Image (cartoon, rainbow, N blue to C red):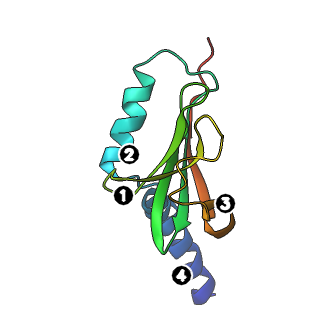
Amino acid sequence: MRFILMAVALIALCSGTCNKAQKLVPPCIQQKIDAIKAQTVWNPPAEVNEYLYQGKLTYLITSNCCDQYIMLYDGTCTPICAPSGGYTGKGDGKCADFSTNATHIRLIWKDERTR
């Protein structure tokens, strides 16, 4: 019985703090999200996804229109590459292995506003 009570207490305690830890976003990525929110709705709507790529957490931010690169950033918002987008749709060629070697972690944010 004592074990069950401890387990329930641990789950209750972790549900508040563990979810916060899982939802942490680097401040510069949050600034990029806030900047997008200040603009009119993109077409297609903006998304920010977190990936594990080359052993690091990275952040893929969609573009606001056609033929633009979809940029991948590290946790300090330093651009790494553009895995897709541009005129060819194949990005800038600097991370051609992204689609096969990156692991999607989570959708961080999607603009749900409507036009």
Under mark 2, the amino acid is Ile
Mark-to-mark CA distance, 3 and 4: 43 Å
Q: 102 or 14, which lies in front?
A: 102
Q: Is residue 6 above or below residue 76?
A: below
Q: Amino acid at mark 3?
A: Ser
The image quarter in which residue 37 lies: top left
* Residue plotted at (48% across, 75% down): 55
Which of the image's four quarters has the N terminus?
bottom right
Distance between mark 2 and mark 1 Cα atoms? 7 Å
> Cβ–Cβ below 8 Å for labels 2 and 1?
yes
Residue wearing tag 1: 75
The residue under the point 51% across, 75% down is 10
Q: Earlier in the sequence, mark 4 or mark 1?
A: 4
Which residue type carries mark 4? Met
Q: CA distance from mark 4 to mark 2?
A: 37 Å
Q: Secondary structure at mark 4?
A: helix
- Element type where label 1 sits in the image: loop
Q: Pointer 4: what residue?
A: 6
Left or right: 22, with 111 as reference point: left
Q: To which residue does mark 2 refer?
A: 29
Q: Is residue 114 above or below residue 49?
A: above
Residue depicted at 60% across the width and 55% down the height? 106
Around disc 4, counting alpha carbons within 10 Å, would you say few (fewer than 14), some (14 to 19), or many (20 or more)? few
Q: Nearer the viewer, residue 6 or 98?
A: 98
